[in-house]
Image (cartoon, rainbow, N blue to C red):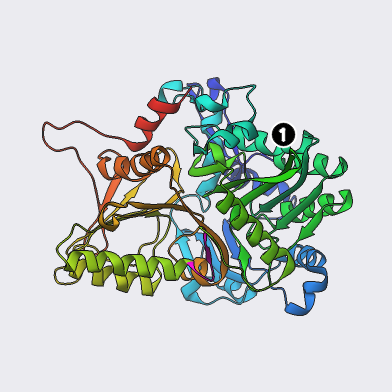
Amino acid sequence: RILPRVLKLPPEICNGDNGFVFLSSILHEYVGKLFPGMEVKGCHQFRLTRDSDLTVDEEDLKNLRTAIQSELQDREYGDGVRLEVAETCPAHIYEFLLGHFKLDINELYQVKGPVNLVRLMAVPDMVDRPDLKFPPRTAGLPKSLTKGKSVIDAAAAAPVLLHHPYQSFEPVVRFIQEAAADPDVVAIKMTIYRTGSSSELVKALLRATQAGKIVTVVVELMARFDEANNVNWAQQLENAGAHVVYGVFGYKVHAKMALVIRREEGVLKRYAHLGTGNYHQGTSRIYTDFGLITADEDLTADVNTLFMEITGLGQPGRLNKLYQSPFTLHTMLMESIAREMRHAQDGRPAWIIAKMNSLIEPGIIEALYAASAAGVQIDLIVRGMCALRPEVPGLSDNIRVRSIIGRQLEHSRVYYFYNDGEENTYISSADWMGRNFFRRIETCTPIEDAALKARVIREGLTLALQDNRQAWLMRPDGSYARAEPAEGGEEASLQDQLWAEYGA
């Protein structure tokens, strides 16, 4: 692993500046030098995929971090689930490997060419061809949060909506950094699902703890492939004196929320951040997500209640505005769909628009089919898995599904219900999947400010429905066709439009 898997060749060898060779090809050519005095009869690439799930029993909860650390050591030796071999690999070799890893022939994949194309990810950084690369882009800042202005002061004046990566993630970092340095802040609470190996947010939490503030951090140790990072941060936070909680057994804490409690004129005031994406500075430059920084008393009280539920393992409290999984979110969505059905049956306009990563929960899908039959117009923007079939005669005539695939990974979750003109609009951490509704702790935040609601509807939904450059339209049979501009019509790109509006 210490060697590069793709090597750049000298120009004199390849008659140009951009010649490359796989390390594996060099090994093939010179493999005899590794076995002096022996005759090498064959050299074949193979790749084994192992089961990466971690298993933690309820009895391990007393020291969950230690249990996870132990499981991580064994991950490299998990059961094999797939064997890939070069197409030229002889049968007696792959049969030996299948037997060794306890796999059958149905778990064998014979590959034309390199067995691991991920190695090619290194090539773009070694090629000096700016004409073949995306132009560099810099995220902008809202006018209320230009450099030097306090994020907490701005949120006290009016709620702040951020749309990443077009708008910088920096205000979220500053929000926690300001709170850590502010002598009037008495407590900070935050969830960590994925945050990366070098997080300014966690460093700010450490400084806050050292400054004597009450810091409570809910760390999801079972965030797949981020377990090692999260164990490391949890240990550092515990050592510094923070109150670290590992969630609720059987439920992943997937909600993205932070709470700052500040003493102002003898009264405690709360500020909260609620988002659709992780507190990860790296992915915030790649993934599209919404985040709301607010001083709304009802919302911040709800966030405080959720933290009390998670950290105290108490019964769920009544929330003012937020919806949460596994208790109220699925019910709210089912009721909202049913309400649109009633509007349609009464002859009023009825419209549902929803944007998410995946849609596979059977109850929601059946409800959407029923709403379509009642005349509700339904537009779904689903980047990944979608078990619903649109525009099937007699089943989903009024449902349309599209997927936006562009430079940014579409990650935000936005729900919209026309509701006879009220236009109920939400941002959420939850996809429409069984695990998000019933096996995770998620939040769903209503956007009530008129200007911010208009932004979420336009930037999260309307522009996505107008996209004819990076959108793929799902057909009734489950296949996709790329959207095209109408003859003589203008091209429209959701992501390019937002970069043009917000990019610095």
Residue 86: percent from left, percent from top: 50, 57
Q: Is residue 325 magenta?
A: yes
Position of 204 compared to 100: left or right? Answer: right
Q: Tell me if residue 166 comes above or below residue 462 in the rendering.
A: above
Q: For the point 83% across and 54% down, which residue is it?
A: 235
Q: Which residues are magenta?
A: 322-328
Q: SS at mark 1?
A: helix
Write down the quadrant of residue 95 in the picture. bottom right
The answer to whether one can see residue 169 in this image is no
Position of 205 compared to 390: left or right? Answer: right
Q: Tell me if residue 347 comes above or below residue 458 in the rendering.
A: below
Residue 99: percent from left, percent from top: 60, 76
Q: Which residue is mark 1?
A: 178
Q: Nearer the viewer, residue 252 or 228?
A: 252
Q: For the point 39% across and 63% down, which residue is it?
A: 359
Q: Tell me if residue 220 comes above or below residue 188 in the rendering.
A: below
Q: Seen from this angle, which residue lies furthest front?
A: 266
Q: Which class describes the residues within 10 Å of circle 1: few (<14), some (14-19), or many (20+)?
A: some
Q: Is residue 455 magenta?
A: no
Write down the quadrant of residue 217 in the picture. bottom right
Q: Nearer the viewer, residue 152 or 463?
A: 152
Residue 45: percent from left, percent from top: 57, 56
Q: Nearer the viewer, residue 145 or 42?
A: 145
Q: Seen from this angle, which residue lies furthest left?
A: 487
Position of 62 compared to 123: left or right? Answer: right
Q: For the point 29% across and 58% down, which residue is it?
A: 419
